Amino acid sequence: FLDANENSYGSPLPANYNRYPDPLQLDLKDAISKIKGVPIENTFLGNGSDEAIDLLYRAFCNPGKDNVIILPPTYGMYEVSANINDVEIRKVSLLPNFQLDLEKIAESIDKNTKIIFICSPNNPTGNSINREDIETILTNFKGIVVVDEAYINYARQKTFIQELTEYGNLVVLQTFSKAWGLAALRLGMAFSSRKVIDVLNKIKPPYNINQATQDLAFEALKNIDQVNTWIKETVTERERLSIELNALNIVTKVYLSDANFILARNGLRIGNGYQSGWFGYIIKS
């Protein structure tokens, strides 16, 4: 420990936070492995899933040359990270039923396409993406396929973690921010082949997960029964709210949700309040 020049008196806090944390978070990964059934060597922990997304760009994309495919409407961080890393974004919109347009995705792929991001259950629509369609992409695309499962705990569809041994190009993202209720900790998980995980570990900052986060997440994992109860209650209330929304005259469609939120379409016509003078009237009055 002498080489790190840590404070030898300890910490003013009850825990021993004077020591630098385990850079590979082995104890926490072991606890996660017991729940997820994924070996430690196939697990990466990031400062939120956003760190894993950023590292995937840095590891597998050449700035100013390569491109990735995203499927809007979708999670906004894929595009943010692409812009930061100077990687071209190719957008292939989901079909009207919010499923994959496999034909247009295939047309958008070229030799410089390195990653396809699939959010399932999808943010912001809430639906799961057809499993067979994702498997088609995994089979036919030679680059990295990221399946972002931030909301998988609420889904009817099973996780793609079970397919890691089948597809070497699969990366599954999950998070402690949603069902686990630990958004403030910023702790995300990436599961993939050992080859991909080794690359991510080589390029990440040495201490990307602080000790306080590791300790709190480790304790939270002991309360999985409580978390499972919350998940069941959320799903029950989601179904009840869907029924209630369908009963409203103003609502024209309630979309099937596999998340902890619901997308609904209403019949209201939205106008430009500024152009109509309505906003100005409110301010004056």
Image (cartoon, helix red, strand yellow):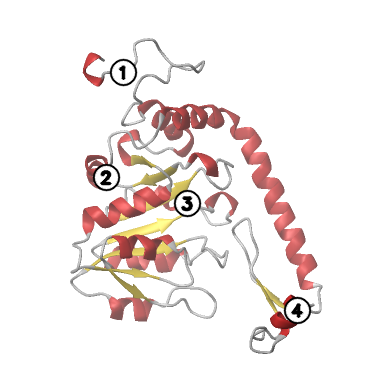
Q: Earlier in the sequence, mark 1 or mark 2?
A: 1
Q: Report helix, strand or loop for mark 4.
A: helix
Q: Which residue is mark 2?
A: 200
Tell me the distance, in whole angstroms, between the alpha carbons under discs 2 and 4: 56 Å
Q: Earlier in the sequence, mark 2 or mark 4?
A: 2
Camera-near label (1 vs 3) is: 1
Tell me the distance, in whole angstroms, between the alpha carbons under discs 1 and 4: 60 Å
Residue 284: assigned label: 4
Camera-near label (3 vs 4) is: 4
Tell me the distance, in whole angstroms, between the alpha carbons under discs 1 and 3: 42 Å
**Vertical placement of residue 102 versus 9, above or below:** below
Q: Which residue is mark 3?
A: 159
Camera-near label (1 vs 4) is: 4
- Quadrant position of residue 53: bottom left
Question: Where residue 209 appears, x then y in whole percent?
Answer: 39, 35
Question: Where residue 150 appears, x then y in whole percent?
Answer: 50, 52
**Vertical placement of residue 7 versus 76, above or below:** above
Q: Earlier in the sequence, mark 1 or mark 4?
A: 1
